[in-house]
Image (tube, rainbow, N blue to C red):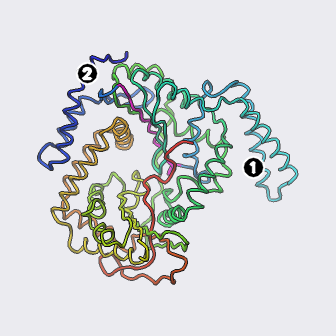
Amino acid sequence: MIPSTSSSRSLQPLWVVLCAALWMWASLGPGVTSSQDLLQQFEDRVTTFTLDNGLTFLVIERPEAPVVSFHTYADVGSVDEPSGQTGIAHMFEHMAFKGTTRIGTQDIEQEIAAINEMEATYQELLREQSRPQPDSARITTLQSEFESAQEEAESHIDAGAYDGLLEREGASGLNAFTSADATGYLYSLPANKVELFFATESERFLYPVLREFYTERDVVMEERRQRTESNPTGRLLEEFIAAAFKAHPYGNPVIGHMSDLETLTITEAESFFEKYYQANNLTIAMAGDVDPDEARELAEKYFTRLPEGEKPLPVLTEEPEQPGERRVTLEEQAQPFVFVGYHRDSMLSDDDPVYRVLQDVLTQGRTSRLYESLVDTGDALQVQALPSFPGSKYPSLFALVGVPAQDVTPESIEQAIYDELDRLIDEGITEDELERAKTRVRANLVRQLNSNMGLAQQFAQMQALTGDWRTVFENVDAVEAVTAEDVQRVAEATFTRSNRTVGVIKSADDDDEDDTSEDDASEEAMPEEAMPEESSDTGSSDTE
């Protein structure tokens, strides 16, 4: 049953104390309160349970207001897409808002019959188009039959029914994202509407209907045109990751390649769903004014209907060691950009916390090294380090981004980045820099956990990727244990010329670039073009 107002008030003072402890811990530095002390306080507020079908729930009691935020984490991203089907993870994210056999239809039997006829016709059309000598007359006939079947199928749709149902009951922040590693679905509801979440969320993964698939595919292709093909930075980003990853699917764009999008089918999307949207590949977290006993009862009532399925294998392809520097240069009448990426191990590596410190020392805040040497001097409009790009589940890149100011060449920005990396390798970092980095990591955790949705997202992700939500706090402990010697060691091993990929947008009016020099970042420097834009999620972060 729904928690009463009085029981919510009885819990609230403890949460206020917890928030105060969090902020003290973040601001007063080491020794005030350990993350393990904070973890213990969360232990009293977090309930986890796993259904017989393998679906894990996390219930985080935070009764400050009568609202609950929900995050469904699907352990599938663009990295998992079959060859020739890039973009299908993002495509299914769009489909998940189209409703079910009961929500979003005026006549499900007629709609399904029309969808099946449309798909059969489309499959026949693809076969004819792929023949060595296609029959143009037959293609015209099949195209006409497909469009008629599509019109018939869409005539049975109750458009916007799924979103509308939730929004009428007070849902807010209805959204989704697709990244290289995962797909997430999130929104908040009034606390007295918790059962609505369990009913509708279970139904959209139990009885999905891929309605308007080909119409939505056109929307995604237009999204690609706008974000990538008509956007110089988007084009550079796509070329950059393709150059950096020759074997591993991190080299594929989350939005998908246009030629793949043009031929994605309902049949492929259904197979993708059946493989990756089984109960044991989902993790659901909720935070707010929620009773864990009620949540367990509702989970048993609604989500035990989902089949367990077979847990998909992880990506087994390994990126081979890079034998030499790789470079991509785009000449555009556009804002110059520089991307520099160095291969690194996955988030499970013992050195993962060291990369977080490196990110902080290099670009976090006005006292960071690249901010002082590039932004403060007026040479750059922006600098940023991305500790794990484009994902973190598998070995990825430590990436640096620089945006030159007017009349400053991307070559000079790139060289300045290498100069700072050389200095870091040669001289290491100071204890003050190390302590500032650790303090900011603690403060960032506080910010992430300061909202219901932040809690749900962080805990769901860590539960799915590491098997334990407590990793959120253990990661901070790992950063606390980092030494200046660790930073210098990892920098020296990582920031070598042969380990890097460089992407640059330079003005089409610039002279031809020079060749680069030094053998690694700790020797001389290496000029030439480079420049990208930040992004930890190269796909969609909202639904259409």
> Picture coordinates of residue 536 (x, y %)?
42, 54
Magenta-drawn segment: 66-80
**Which residue is under mark 2?**
9
Nearer-the-camera pick, 235 or 123: 235
Which of disc 2 and disc 1 is earlier in sequence?
2
Q: Say if 331 sits above or below 314 in the image.
A: below
Nearer-the-camera pick, 494 or 534: 534
Residue located at (14% from left, 48% from top): 28
Residue 96 visible here = yes
Q: Nearer the viewer, mark 1 or mark 2?
A: 2
Q: Say if 532 sits above or below 5 in the image.
A: below
**Which residue is under mark 1?**
126
The image quarter containing residue 323 is: bottom left
Disc 2: CA contacts within 10 A as few (<14), some (14-19) or many (>=20): few
Image quadrant where one finds the N terminus = top left
> Picture coordinates of residue 295 (x, y %)?
38, 23
Image quadrant where one finds the C terminus = top right
Disc 1: CA contacts within 10 A as few (<14), some (14-19) or many (>=20): some
The image quarter containing residue 453 is: top left
Element assignment for label 1: helix
Spatial CA span between label 1 and label 2: 61 Å
Which residue type does callout 2 highlight?
Arg
Which residue type does callout 1 highlight?
Leu
Element assignment for label 2: helix
**524 with respect to 210 (left or right):** left
